[in-house]
Image (cartoon, rainbow, N blue to C red):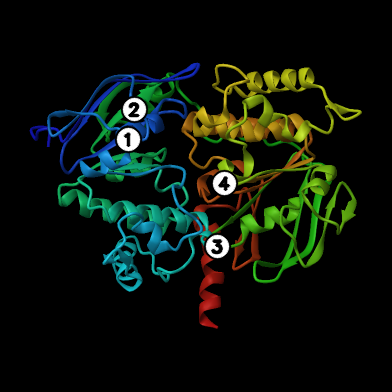
Amino acid sequence: MSQAPPLLQVEGLVKRFPGVVALGGVSFDLVPGEVHVLLGENGAGKSTLIKCLAGVHQSDEGTIMVDGKPVVLHGTADAERLGIATIHQEFNLVTQLSVAENVLLGRQPRSAGIIKPSEMNRVAAQAMAKVGLTIDPRTPVSSLGVARQQLVEIAKALSLDARILIMDEPTAALTDDEVDRLLALMEELRSRGVAMVFISHHLDEIRRIGDRVTVLRDGKSISTVPASTPTHELVRLMVGRSIDAQYPRARGEVGDVLLSVEALTAKGRFEDINLEVRAGEVVGLAGLVGAGRTEVLRAIFGADAFDTGTVTVKGKPSRRRGIARGIEQGLGLVPEDRKHQGLVLGASVADNMGLVLLRDATRAGVVNLGRLAELARRGVESLRIRTPNTKALVKNLSGGNQQKVVMGKWLLADPTVLLLDEPTRGVDVGAKVEIYNLINDMTSAGRGVLMASSDLPEVIGICDRILVMAQGRIVGELSHEEATQATVMALAVQEMESTRAH
């Protein structure tokens, strides 16, 4: 493989944003049939790099070469003409359109200038089948969950018959079976000579599919090594230090019940949910995609309505719901889709971190901006958010730092119970540990955490108790000592099999 001429070469790439040097000199190459992994902490420059390769951003310095020839990418159309297709970490879908319309957006089959829906649906279905997406191509994307939307993105990229496929965290929201299917598909593409740039924080995936790994740190390429390089060496290259504990959970004494949910039901979404979260405790919600975890968290917080049941915080029940009521009760929610539900991307770090505190910082209708700015500055320091200052726009931060901003606004508000939905999705190893330490700080201060996550090792490593959900119901509970990947999945799958049998 090393003797094949590079299909893609990147030399000394530099990209600057106002107040931020996102790329400070990145070099790597890609040969046909290779899976080249880009590894680095959030903020290392991975997403900016692939946006330069996709034509979304134009670099300020450096060279991009395809087939040995320098190219200038003025837009995504230029990249696609060269055979470069990209699956971005955050979805690039038109949710009002159907799956088929998204897969073939701008390339719909036409006759005399008129789109042919039946042909469009047929061609899209073929691309969808490659990723195991068996739904009707006419289904609106807005009705799909995160995992299926990700599969639509992958099908869309594959439909371009790309020579170079760039994948930014494509497995972040997928189940184990879906990950296996994707990696098998990547093997097939590799055998056909397709070159792939693959970003993943899952080191097991890197070993299964990767050939070489280029490590980025602080916007620079540090080293290119074989994918078989030991984990501790990859982590050292990535973060510049050794990480002793992957899941640093400080388990202490649990206290009184802070959150009690009784018989919570929302027809068609979940049924008869009963759970408790105590002071100093992290309770996990585990289960397969579609089990109803996100829906339960949003209903408890007050973002979505429910039909029957009671949510009690610190002994005070409330049947009147709504986001304002949830905040009044002492609840906070870090949502799964941080960009659309947890952040105002066009606003500053300070403005975002102050969203929940506006009421407390307002007197006689006047907002104390100095107070908000000071709280934001304190939050940035304590959470180690990488930003030039609190006035920087959130949209220019990396995914991991955006997630810290979402968590930071709630930590500043000091909720009694924090609800976390996929809190480390798309976050690197170093940032994950920092988020786990923030969770520890909360529970050490006598607060409670209810966390939904598809990352089973994370749930097992961080949670004191685990509630397993399937088909909108809680089907079992495991203590930290009882919980293994096998015992959690056995409960989830057993319920699924029981449902199918009936």
Which residue in the structure is indicated by mark 1? 55
Percent coordinates x, y for residue 435 in the rendering: 59, 33
Q: Is residue 385 left or right of residue 152?
A: right
Badge 3 vs badge 4, beta-carbon distance below 8 Å? no
Percent coordinates x, y for residue 35 in the rendering: 24, 41
- Mark toward the start of the polypeptide (3 vs 2): 2
**Residue 243 in sight in this render:** yes
Which residue in the structure is indicated by mark 4? 337
Percent coordinates x, y for residue 444 in the rendering: 74, 32
Q: CA distance from mark 3 to mark 2?
A: 39 Å
- Mark toward the start of the polypeptide (1 vs 3): 1
Amino acid on which the number 2 mark rests in the picture: Gln
Amino acid on which the number 3 mark rests in the picture: Gly
Badge 2 vs badge 1, beta-carbon distance below 8 Å? yes
**SS under mark 1:** loop
Which residue in the structure is indicated by mark 3? 290
Image height check: is 320 above or below 219?
Answer: below
Q: Nearer the viewer, residue 420 or 47?
A: 47
Percent coordinates x, y for residue 48 in the rendering: 39, 30
- Mark toward the start of the polypeptide (4 vs 1): 1
**SS under mark 4:** loop
Q: Nearer the viewer, residue 467 or 384?
A: 384
Amino acid on which the number 1 mark rests in the picture: Gly
- Mark toward the start of the polypeptide (4 vs 2): 2
Which is in the foreground here, disc 3 or disc 4? Answer: 4
- Mark toward the start of the polypeptide (3 vs 4): 3
Image height check: is 11 above or below 211?
Answer: above
Badge 3 vs badge 2, beta-carbon distance below 8 Å? no
Q: Is residue 462 left or right of residue 497?
A: right
Residue 58 is tagged as 2
Image height check: is 315 above or below 405?
Answer: below
